[in-house]
Amino acid sequence: MTILLKSELILASASKTRLEMLARHGLNINNHPADIDEEELKTTKCSQMSAEEMALFLAKEKALDVSRKFPDAYIIAADQVCLLDGKVYDKPGSIENCIQHLKELRSKTHTQNCAMLLVKNSEVILESLSKAEITLRDLTDDEIKAYVNLEEPLHSAGSYMLERHGKHIFKEVRGDHDVILGLDTVKLFNKLYELDIISLTTQ
């Protein structure tokens, strides 16, 4: 069985994890990262938004930016926001921030908000928000430092990487693992089949 791709499909992301996730599910496509300043947008446009609103807004900005460059292609874009008790945990960017984030998240349940859009010629075809809840073990400081030094999750919201060694620090996961990785593949594939963009074939 193979997946037949009938239209051009582009991932508006530099995320290797999302590309590898799609490839693991039989969908090998190209990616083109959006040319937007996420940090500036978070400061200027998202300061009064909820975590859900921010994730959807940023995903839409990415999708529309790439769609303007490839108007004939279907564009997939996503954004993820990690939230605990009203506080957003962004990409840590440094080892020190990773350690601090995990100290704050340990033994607690936080939410990963995964926004996803499918766009063609600047028209939004699918807009979705999916959530997963993760509870971290009551990690010791030494365990946190050992994990961070092993993983170096500097670009991961929440300061962990499920696709690698993240499960070593988890106590419980409620939700789709692909959502935690940053893309709701079930909703995406359903829409792609509905639009006849992909199909299953025995060839």
Image (spheres, rainbow, N blue to C red):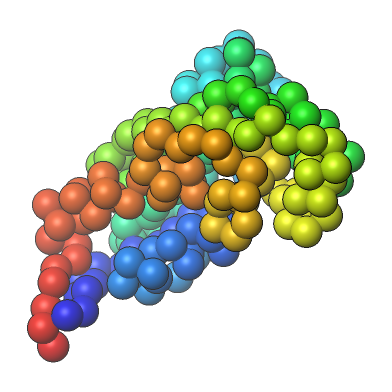
Looking at the image, residue 43 lies above or below residue 146: above
Q: Which image quarter: residue 38?
A: top right
Residue 94 in the image: above or below residue 66:
above
Q: Is residue 166 above or below residue 113?
A: below
Position of residue 59 measured from the top left corner of the image (x, y, whole percent): 48, 39
Q: Is residue 76 visible?
A: yes
Q: Between 45 and 161, which is closer to the camera in this rendering? A: 161
Q: Locate the C terminus by quadrant.
A: bottom left
**Relative side of 192 to 102, left or right:** left
Q: Residue at x 37, y 43 (%)?
A: 176
Residue 6 at x, y percent in the picture: 20, 71
Residue appearing at x 77%, y 29% in the figure? 103
Residue 69, can we see it?
Answer: no
- For the point 14% across and 68% down, the residue is 199
Count of marks placed on residues = 0
Q: Compare residues 43 and 28 and report the one nearer the observer.
A: 28
State left or right for residue 39 relative to residue 14: right
Question: Where residue 89 sits: x, y (%)?
Answer: 68, 29
Q: Is residue 57 left or right of residue 93?
A: left
